[in-house]
């Protein structure tokens, strides 16, 4: 009997698996979830299962993130392999480019179980990013590659991947966003009384280097000052830990530090922001889908379609480019059309995995 294994471990994977998991439940497909617990604070993990009504994982591995990625992936690999040997799934699905996704993909492939990769074909061409290594390896060993747009399909073809493994599906972020945005916007929070910008930062290249992180905070305070808007900063645990370690403080009249938010509060805050400033992959996509201009504090992006349509601008981490980028994006037109699909992305992927249902949604 067909059985599907879902492997996840971090906040964005839980969010981006939302529609696939709900589709499996509603079609009564036999499936199980393995959660590595790479992310483990309630507000990075449990909160999303509860808020998005996701079933509890059958397996919680309790492997928290580790400074050494080899150790983290190794511990995950050992436990996932044992579970897959017992469960014997037909397909295992991983999402994105985290260490949890890599461990899941490796364990699956070594056992010769079919592997599906959701959000395949993204490339930043920056091998300094742990995610770039992970996604290249995952794509290479996958049996089905679910690409958000034509861009990623072309990349995979150029890398020599067989065409019949590649499907353009859209990005599942559209499903979870479309299905929750109306509910999210009901909430009126006093944070919205005045215009504000929204900030998230968690890339090691921005927050693991004291000098860069400190300079970024100063640049962003300057942006808040220039535009007379405060910046709301739901702080990722990595960044919170680094701020403490480096003793970085912010001017609280300019930057409001808050704990990581639930999904509904987050997309509400995103939609009402004048500008999203981020180094997150998911936020670059959400800003584009929600019609909010985005400034990406990086030198490259694996989401170049957002640059092409003008929803996003790469500004690196220098004060001058951040300020000029903010000026440009705050005056930008926001009438672009996002390229990430139609809200049926999860359905389309499940159509492929569950063969007795016609593959009617495989392309859109
Ligand atoms: C990971 C992913 C990254 C993704 C991000 C999403 C890898 C290599 N990186 O980065 O691709 O964009 O998740 O948010 O897989 N921490 C806590 N509590 C938590 C979660 C993390 O304290 O619930 C701390 C960890 O102990 C560690 C730091 O945050 O000190 C970083 O966690 P880690 O999972 O290694 O990487 P992320 O930066 O979260
Ligand atoms: N997110 C959230 N609460 C927060 C910050 C982010 O719900 O406080 C959501 C955000 O809306 C997006 C996802 O988390 O869907 C992005 O995750 P993150 O930035 O951690 O990882 P990345 O996308 O960079 O891998």
Image (cartoon, rainbow, N blue to C red):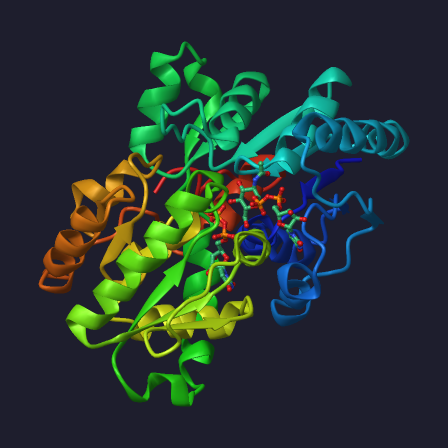
> Considering only vertical position in the picture, is 294 above or below 229?
above
The extreme top residue here reads 160
Report x, y in % for residue 199: 37, 62
Q: Is residue 358 left or right of residue 252?
A: right
Closer to us: 253 or 89: 253
Closer to us: 175 or 299: 299
> Considering only vertical position in the picture, is 101 above or below 45?
above
> Considering only vertical position in the picture, is 118 above or below 287?
above
Closer to us: 61 or 330: 330
Q: Residue at x 45, y 25 (%)?
A: 128
Q: Is residue 291 left or right of residue 285?
A: left
Q: How many marks?
A: 0
Quadrant of res 218: bottom left
Report x, y in % for residue 169: 42, 40
Report x, y in % for residue 336: 16, 55
The answer to whether residue 188 shows anywhere in this view is no
Q: Residue at x 27, y 37 (%)?
A: 304
Report x, y in % for residue 216: 34, 52
Closer to us: 278 or 116: 278
Q: Is residue 32 left or right of residue 144?
A: right
Q: Residue at x 44, y 14 (%)?
A: 161
Q: Residue at x 29, y 65 (%)?
A: 221
- Identify the image quadrant of the N terminus: top right
Q: Is residue 3 left or right of residue 11?
A: right
- Identify the image quadrant of the C terminus: top left
The answer to whether residue 320 shows anywhere in this view is yes
Quadrant of res 50: bottom right
């Amino acid at each position: 009997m067909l059985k599907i294994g879902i492997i996840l471990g971090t906040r964005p994977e839980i969010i981006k698996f939302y529609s696939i998991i709900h589709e499996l439940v509603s079609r009564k497909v036999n499936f199980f979830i393995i959660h590595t617990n790479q992310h483990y604070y309630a507000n990075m993990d449990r909160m999303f299962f509860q808020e998005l009504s996701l079933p509890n994982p059958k397996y919680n591995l309790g492997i928290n993130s580790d400074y050494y990625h080899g150790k983290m992936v190794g511990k995950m690999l050992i436990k996932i392999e044992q579970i897959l040997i017992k469960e014997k799934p037909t397909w295992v699905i991983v999402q994105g480019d985290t260490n949890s996704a890599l461990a899941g993909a490796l364990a699956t492939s070594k056992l010769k179980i079919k592997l599906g990769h959701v959000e395949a074909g993204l490339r930043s061409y920056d091998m300094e990013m742990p995610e770039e290594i992970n996604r290249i390896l995952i794509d290479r060993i996958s049996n089905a590659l679910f690409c958000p747009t034509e861009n990623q399909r072309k990349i995979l073809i150029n890398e020599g991947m067989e065409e019949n493994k590649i499907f353009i599906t859209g990005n599942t972020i559209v499903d979870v966003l479309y299905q929750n945005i109306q509910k999210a916007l009901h909430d009126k929070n006093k944070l919205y009384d005045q215009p504000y910008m929204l900030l998230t930062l968690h890339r090691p290249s921005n927050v693991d280097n004291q000098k860069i992180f400190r300079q970024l905070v100063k640049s962003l305070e300057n942006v808040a000052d220039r535009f007379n808007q405060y910046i709301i900063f739901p702080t990722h645990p990595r960044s919170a830990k680094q701020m403490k370690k480096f003793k970085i403080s912010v001017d609280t009249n300019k930057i409001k530090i808050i704990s990581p938010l639930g999904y509904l509060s987050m997309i509400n805050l995103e939609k009402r922001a004048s500008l999203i400033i981020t180094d997150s992959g998911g936020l670059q996509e959400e800003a584009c889908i929600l019609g909010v201009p985005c400034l990406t504090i990086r030198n490259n992006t694996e989401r170049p379609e957002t640059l092409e349509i003008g929803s996003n601008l790469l500004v690196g981490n220098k004060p001058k480019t951040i300020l000029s980028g903010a000026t440009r994006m705050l005056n930008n037109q926001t009438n672009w059309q996002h390229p990430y699909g139609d809200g049926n992305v999860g359905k389309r992927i499940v159509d492929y995995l569950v063969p007795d249902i016609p593959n009617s949604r495989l392309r859109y």
